[in-house]
Amino acid sequence: RYGQMEVQDQVGTATGLAYTAAGGDTLSIEVAHYPGKGKLILTGKLGDVMRESAQAAFSYIRSRADQLNVPSDFHEKNDIHIHVPEGATPKDGPSAGITIATALVSSLTGRPIKKEVGMTGEITLRGRVLPIGGLKEKSLSAHRAGITTIIMPKENEKDLEDIPESVREELQFILVDHLDQVLEHALVGEDDEGNSR
Amino acid sequence: RYGQMEVQDQVGTATGLAYTAAGGDTLSIEVAHYPGKGKLILTGKLGDVMRESAQAAFSYIRSRADQLNVPSDFHEKNDIHIHVPEGATPKDGPSAGITIATALVSSLTGRPIKKEVGMTGEITLRGRVLPIGGLKEKSLSAHRAGITTIIMPKENEKDLEDIPESVREELQFILVDHLDQVLEHALVGEDDEGNSR
Amino acid sequence: RYGQMEVQDQVGTATGLAYTAAGGDTLSIEVAHYPGKGKLILTGKLGDVMRESAQAAFSYIRSRADQLNVPSDFHEKNDIHIHVPEGATPKDGPSAGITIATALVSSLTGRPIKKEVGMTGEITLRGRVLPIGGLKEKSLSAHRAGITTIIMPKENEKDLEDIPESVREELQFILVDHLDQVLEHALVGEDDEGNSR
Amino acid sequence: RYGQMEVQDQVGTATGLAYTAAGGDTLSIEVAHYPGKGKLILTGKLGDVMRESAQAAFSYIRSRADQLNVPSDFHEKNDIHIHVPEGATPKDGPSAGITIATALVSSLTGRPIKKEVGMTGEITLRGRVLPIGGLKEKSLSAHRAGITTIIMPKENEKDLEDIPESVREELQFILVDHLDQVLEHALVGEDDEGNSR
Amino acid sequence: RYGQMEVQDQVGTATGLAYTAAGGDTLSIEVAHYPGKGKLILTGKLGDVMRESAQAAFSYIRSRADQLNVPSDFHEKNDIHIHVPEGATPKDGPSAGITIATALVSSLTGRPIKKEVGMTGEITLRGRVLPIGGLKEKSLSAHRAGITTIIMPKENEKDLEDIPESVREELQFILVDHLDQVLEHALVGEDDEGNSR
Amino acid sequence: RYGQMEVQDQVGTATGLAYTAAGGDTLSIEVAHYPGKGKLILTGKLGDVMRESAQAAFSYIRSRADQLNVPSDFHEKNDIHIHVPEGATPKDGPSAGITIATALVSSLTGRPIKKEVGMTGEITLRGRVLPIGGLKEKSLSAHRAGITTIIMPKENEKDLEDIPESVREELQFILVDHLDQVLEHALVGEDDEGNSR
Ligand SMILES: [Ca+2]
Ligand SMILES: [Ca+2]
Ligand SMILES: [Ca+2]
Ligand SMILES: [Ca+2]
Ligand SMILES: [Ca+2]
Ligand SMILES: [Ca+2]
Ligand SMILES: [Ca+2]
Ligand SMILES: [Ca+2]
Ligand SMILES: [Ca+2]
Ligand SMILES: [Ca+2]
Ligand SMILES: [Ca+2]
Ligand SMILES: [Ca+2]
């Protein structure tokens, strides 16, 4: 079963790009929140590096709640659950960092994520985007799944040349070095300052 | 001992379909709740994937409590226990997801589950139903146990052809891609909108 | 040292029947409670399956506190300790389920358990009694220990024929499929509805 | 270094008898309590069986606080620490049960323990005293350490014959089957009912 | 990819110097805090020694909050997250101690860290700076990354001679034996006593 | 690097004597406390026996807070951190017990510890001092580090003869069997009863 693009823009669901021994794959990252006491729940057979990556994304958002239009007390009045479906498949690595962060912001602000966007990049506690591996394989699988826009780390620009030209021409690549740029391109609608996109 | 159909519609007990090295089997999923502090207890020698699957089902229900007619504060005033009997038999995998979700909703709303229904399907945090393996073996064991209706993932439609025709003709298959459809077919009685079933 | 029957009816102590590589044995299940915060303590070198079995018994009782005449707030005002003596001997398996449940109900209601009764059977979250193994060996050891009444799962009826007739004739077997029947036969005295036993 | 008898009656310190591959030994069990929140702390390189044994002793005392003249709220206003010195030596097994229980009661009531008394016996949640191994070796080491009175399980009476007569004649053996008897012989002074000892 | 100097002075981000089998490397230490309950979160695939080192740095700062101009109640009103990016790379050892402490003080006081400074040194609970290994390799990698000032333990002075003269001449080395000296040289701006730097 | 004597009397820092396969060594034990909720934090790559030893020292002090002039509520208003520097070096064993206890009392009362004093001895929950190993090696390394007074267990008196006379003559040995004696000789200044030292 190949990954598939979402059929409509979703709140709390972002599409990541994974790279395994078996090649590239797309990955749904789902976030839900509900009244609770601030617990962060992580499921989907996630390895330690991916769990820490999710924790870093979560902390970045908590430390910048105001700028991101996230209610500043969401963390103490809600439990947050991050799940990566296909629960029997092990997943690991830091490259889902910006995807997790985007799904979290979407869930907490209610703004949908554009269904045609896939993304990959490690996130730091300051929101910086660090480079990842397997850009070629990730791009091929995203293309197969119907994704048309890929958000990727600026530091991986040199790896674009590895993607077959026929595929590269059908994809739009957005190069970023900070999560603010990811959110600007991935979230639907208008932000606080009234800029439409 | 083959699995057996329930003798009457039960609140908080759903029948799942399992697939092991030894073939297919039916599985009771039991849910009980009682005054407590919001703890989720999982027993029955469950592996990590099945435990995470239960957690995802639980979070989906908490994040949609209103629509599912579940009192929104049940989670902080109750402990919830999910148990899968035959406590010495190891169980694992994500395919009991929709069965666990159905048993939870039944326990929390008091609506019984139809005794003639068996089901299988991974659940995601958004309530989507993902495909499973072993549909043939699961169907055979359900049939042996007296089940007449099987709720299964739409994405497994292609696997129906693997089931011997003699059995297939005695079973009703309901293909779903969201938990809402599972609940509509598995729960007894009228829902909030007054639709009888 | 063979197991021994209690010398008088006890509150909070039930006699289980165990089946190990070395044959059958009797097992005291002791329950004590005291002012606390709802902690469940399990000791006696118990394996995971037996611990989960105790948890299922405990949850069944909590979810049916009213019908069982257990004060509904006992769980938040008491700690409950379940201990299986001979603390150096490893114990495991689900077949002590109904024995643990009976000892719990006895401790929480103050009703003694008949000293001449031994029992075996897995319990589910709904109070159903599931079949067990080793009925023959369990019966022989119970007989040696002075037990005269054995409560056992209805589904094990077919295994009665394996017990030597000389022993079988000196034992009374009570076949049950629900914990309510276990309690009716194991607890001393009158219940709420005024039925004497 | 052989074990040594205490030089005076102590509150919160009891002498146990241990039996290891290297022979018998005496063991100090120390208990201290201080304002806290009811935590039970166990140290001294104790194995799981000995830790569970301490927990059973603790629960017995909590469930019988009134009869033992222990303030019924000590558990929620104090932390209790049980330590077995010579912290680098691993210790395990259930036979220190009655020694731990005696040290706990002494610490919580302020009544000293007679310095010439050594003891051995498993304790159950009901205060019953179960048999132990190594009585001969334990008695020899107690004798060497200056102990003159040994409290031991009634069920071990048959093992007295294994102790060399020269040693046996210099020791007083007190056979018990319940903790009440242990406390009666080990604690100094008058109890609640005004019986002097 | 070689480490890179920060492009501007940052609050909550300090540059450490690491020494691995593969040679020297620079390391960003990121600290964020946000409203919470005093939890300390550590991520970045950190080994036990590095985690304890972070804990020691944190405790030093908490025990000297007043002198460091850190609000004395920050610990109970905030969660603190320390992250070391490149989340898939294992990191360990005590030599990031002063870097972590500096990043913590910067985050908690809002004073930026000079971007041209790299540092290495174990920290103790009293703020003492203990010697480290690999000064040569650390200095070379810092130089490559554009760092111009290295803060290092006074006890490592003898190791300066191992650094090639061409590199040594382009670096300023600040030798310290206490964290106070580290903070004086690493933090931008004026401190409480009005000393400009 | 040999251990070194402190350059001045310190509050919360005591010098212990360690004995490893590589010979004797001196060890700083550092204690800090700060507003918190009573957590005991132990760092410095400490083994289980050393951790339990610290816990026993802590409990002894809590159970005798009044006599030791420690505010009786320090434990619920402070977190206590015990750290043993050189964080990458594994440490274990019970012989740092009295050193840890002394550093704790110093930190909690504000009385400094004499810088010329080194010490070794297991502590029990009653404050008794038990014998240790490696006195010769410990004394030699203490001497090398500039220590002039060694506090040691009375039960190790027989091992003094193993120390070379040239070293023995330059050291003062204080033999103790209770922590009270340790504190009397290690802490600077006047105690509550007005005795100067
Ligand atoms: Ca896939
Ligand atoms: Ca390339
Ligand atoms: Ca079955
Ligand atoms: Ca097929
Ligand atoms: Ca037995
Ligand atoms: Ca048969
Ligand atoms: Ca000994
Ligand atoms: Ca004998
Ligand atoms: Ca690097
Ligand atoms: Ca050198
Ligand atoms: Ca050293
Ligand atoms: Ca000697």
Image (tube, coloured by chain):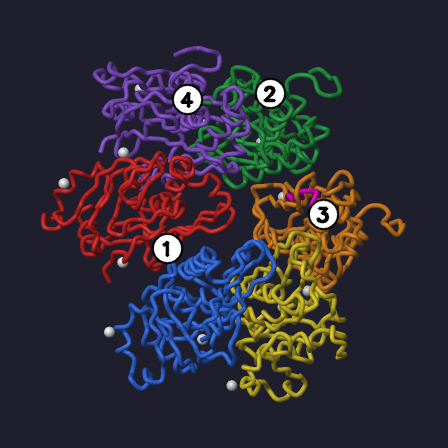
Chain colours: A green, B purple, C red, D blue, E orange, F yellow
Magenta-drawn segment: E73-83
Disc 4 designates what residue? B111
> Which chain letter goes with mark 4?
B
Q: Nearer the viewer, mark 4 or mark 1?
A: 4
Q: From what the image shows, is residue E51 above or below residue E34?
A: below
Disc marking residue A113: 2
Say whether mark 3 and mark 2 are on the same chain: no
User: Which percent across, then down, holds residue B152?
Assistant: 36, 20
Calculate the distance from the C-alpha at mark 3 to the C-alpha at mark 4: 54 Å
Residue at left offset 31%, top offset 54%: C28
Calculate the distance from the C-alpha at mark 2 to the C-alpha at mark 3: 34 Å
Disc 3 designates what residue? E104
Residue E1: name its quadrant.
Answer: top right
The answer to which of C82 and A162 lies nearer the viewer is C82
Q: Nearer the viewer, mark 1 or mark 3?
A: 1
Instruction: Judge the density around disc 4: few (<14), some (14-19), many (≥20) Cα neighbours within 10 Å.
Output: many
Q: Is residue F100 left or right of C192 when viewed as pictured?
A: right
Residue D183: name its quadrant.
Answer: bottom left
Residue B155: name its quadrant.
Answer: top left
Which amino acid does the dot numbered 1 rest on? Gly
User: Which percent across, then down, holds residue D159?
Assistant: 27, 74
